[in-house]
Image (cartoon, rainbow, N blue to C red):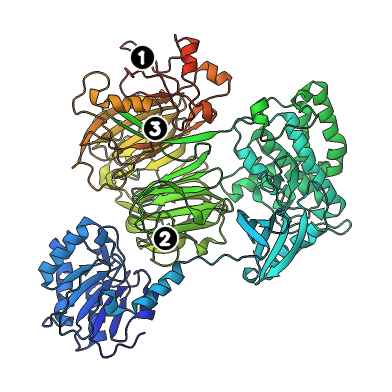
Amino acid sequence: MTDNSHDPLRLIVASNRASHLSLVLETVHSNVKVVQYKYETCTLDDILVQISKSLGTSRVDTIALLMHCSETEIFICFTGGKVLSLESVKADVSIREFLNHLVGHNMKLCIPNCRLDFLNASPSLHVNGGLMVHQLEMLLNIPVGMSKDLFGTGVQLTRVRSDPSPSHMVGELYFNVKKLQDKLKVESSDASERRLEGYEKIRTVGKGAFGTAVLYRKVSDDMLVVIKEVNMIDLTASERQMALNEVQVLSSLDHPNIISYFGSFERDGVLMIEMEYADGGTMAQMLSQRAKRLDEYEILTLFRQIVAAIRYMHDHNILHRDLKTANVFLNKDNTIKVGDFGISKVMTTRAQAQTVLGTPYYISPEMCEGKQYDQKSDIWALGCILYEMACLQKTFQGSNLPALVNKIMKGHFQPVPGGYSPGFRQLIHDLLQRDPVFRPSAAGILDSRLPKLLDSLRGEGRHCFLDHDGSLPSLNTSCNRYCYFIFVRSVLYELKCYESAIALTPIQLPPRSKVMEVAVSSTHIIAVTTEMLVYSWGEGKRGQLGHGDTEPWRQHPEVVEALRGKSINRVGAGDGYSVFVSDSGMMMSCGDGTFGCLGHCDWNNSVRPHLIEKLLSVDVVLIGCGPHHVAVLSRDGEMYAWGRGDGGRLGLGHEEDCCSPMKVTLPTECVVCTLRCGGDGTAVITTDGAMMACGRNSFNKLGLADTSRGFSRFNFKGEIEKALTLTRVKGICYKVADVSLGPTHTAVLTESGHVVTFGCNAEGQLGRGHLKSSSSGPCMVKSVADRVATMVQCGPTYTVVGSIQNAVYFWGTRYGLFNFQDSMGNPMMKAEVSGGWPKSTKVLQEQLLCGSQTASQYTNILNVSDLHSSHLSEIILAPQEILALYASPTQIAKNETVWLAGLYPLRHSVLVLVDTTVPLARLQPQHIKGSGAGSKGIFSSEDNSTEEEQESLQGTDTDSLGPVRNQTVQQKEAWALV
């Protein structure tokens, strides 16, 4: 506290939900009284009583209010739902009386310097903020300020000559600004990176439970090495023993197929383990990038090297105990290197281990049962690896640990696909014997089983897949020579359509990357690629982009540098916040903490991703994000939720906001496999295809109302307004595969590929063919019943569906820009269209058809508060096909195809994720044949063009599935790609 005892008395009224409250208390001047109140339990009168007790008979010159805010509202207290907004300051009598009493009874209104300020208030950035200030000044008859930060930036102070020490900023009236700035910097800054003398840091290449693997270049000999950095201070005794165990095991091994150990040393409490760098990545990464299965000879040649490493270890009485494709590394010359020996165990003669360790997907039945185990558990893991190499998927999969263990114990896995020899299939079967006694040893596999299989393949002429010197082709060159590796890549588009005009614009993501997941919100977009790089773009005013600042807008996708090397494979986005999950189940978040969505046990914002500490012991596998709440599922089948609790959306049995993850009680014997969050609700799907939901049930959008006749007619006298805990949705008579929760309606995808909708239909979003706006129960969308749907998403006023035929269907209300421009400022549409494309769209049409690489400009298309006032609307009552993906037989024969990978609705457009195997340099969509009045569809494969014309279309290296033939689409709003 700074000594300003001779200065005028001032007052800060702070909610316990205010951001950076602890720092405020440390830096206030001595002449400042701080009244803290509990947001969750205090009423407006309670706050006034606390202020009165604190001040007694004294009055203050100025008052500052610190409360948590949304973009347009300031939250005063939870009891009574008291929120300061443009509407409430005009019409809410209790709010007006509270403010009048606050100022009239506690402030020296006779002095010229009196004023009221709202600090760290987000509404200051919104037009409503300025209007609120104007209304408050008229109500209170004193100067009122509202600032986006604690320093009062942007608030003009009125200077009075009699003031002995005039301040330049509002914050100076209350805080030691320099001290507060320093503390905020310390709070938000990341720990400085350690520098090793004699080593040049290149990048982080991996992160595990107890350490980070960093790639360095040794200055002395220019050699690349990996140093595993283990912070021993943060570890328990058993964890420190694991780290030392890795050094012991590595130092005792010397084999060409095992990562070499160069030495270890300690620096500032961090154990540094220096080891060989494998420059080809991991086998897990290699397999994830493949669209076509590996050849049997190639699998066996790689697998033989893995077995050779394990045999060497077993001969030296060492168990690996964590064999998996992520711990099998490759060099660019195709040499296998087995690594990561953190939980390996040195065995004495005839000894057996009993500790349950290892990755759940690869653990053996005896480890699941807690029985003693030996080298045969490593053999089981080898079987899982061999199966994964052949099938490109895990041998045993489950939505949670109990389901996974159940499959492992029963030995249930999908059959190996065709194309592999009987001997190969039998080897997998033998390695995965439930009884370890019947599994072969590593020596038996290497000396007997594999040579026989390889000899039989050579006898069948399979040696033609070898290079001229008899070695296996390099992983980097084999795709060009033999088409072993057909890499899948992704293109993310923004699709806009209005009447007969369409804009399909690629987003500027790396053209050779495959996008694993996309998350969208009303403010920003996040994408993560198979390289585990996270890209974000859009609004960043609350730090939600994770780039370390609060930028108003980021036009194009950019890598979140703070997440490099953290192996992020799942992302989620809400209104002003983002969450990230790594492949190890570690969860981080950044952005707006107003409603506690960051899970950091406070209500503060964060401009960089930080760990959610309460979940450090939880392996997160599924995440769901609503605008203001988050729900996750752990590998153990446990569910956690946090954020805004209004309406019961957290499923915790109450409506209070939570700033840290809280465990959700699931019904007995309920095993959740899918988790989704919507505007003010949460839904889960169980392994038996049932759906449960919680939250606000306006328009019966969660389907919780009682049914009287089947599931299409409801007795609304028993309608449920909200559900505070997960409640089974009984009106759906199909097994549910997926669900999407919109602001006013819900769409369900059944296991049979049908679409069921319920909720509000005022915008035609239910696909019923009418606009009856009364609450509606679950009902199948009959117009697409003859199509097999594979994905469904709810937009704000519409529904969009993707089918197994790679077609996209739309129904509901869609909006076009009023000034007839798309988001790039190009002419897009006319209000009156007669037959085909309007003339004003010809330039855009040619640009799109020729594969424009202009990136989509998202300005003003994400966070728009009023759709109706500035945009044209069009209602589509019946499902309409707006996009189709198509590959000709010739392209399919060359393994060049394209398929729909994801749909992500925005307010005015839809993001469409397309995966393709077409090499980038030859990427080209097929033109669409005119269909005419008598056409039956858009998937015509006829083409009367000459070979010269076909050839003229090739050779463009483009990111937009272009170029394509410049022909118009006669069928309204239909597009075909590739």
- Could you say where residue 889 lies in the image, as x and y percent from the top left? 53, 16
Residue annotated with mark 2: 607
Residue annotated with mark 1: 930
Q: Earlier in the sequence, mark 3 or mark 2?
A: 2
Question: Which of the 4 image quadrants contains residue 906?
Answer: top left
Residue annotated with mark 3: 801
Q: Earlier in the sequence, mark 1 or mark 2?
A: 2
Query: What secondary structure is marked by label 1?
Result: loop
Q: Nearer the viewer, mark 3 or mark 2?
A: 2
Question: Which of the 4 image quadrants contains residue 839?
Answer: top left
Badge 1: how crowded within 10 Å, few (<14), some, or many (20+)?
Answer: some
- Could you say where residue 275 lies in the image, as x and y percent from the top left? 73, 56
Which residue type does callout 2 highlight? Val
Q: Earlier in the sequence, mark 1 or mark 3?
A: 3
Residue in the picture at 21% in, 60% down: 129
Confirm whether residue 782 shows in the render: no
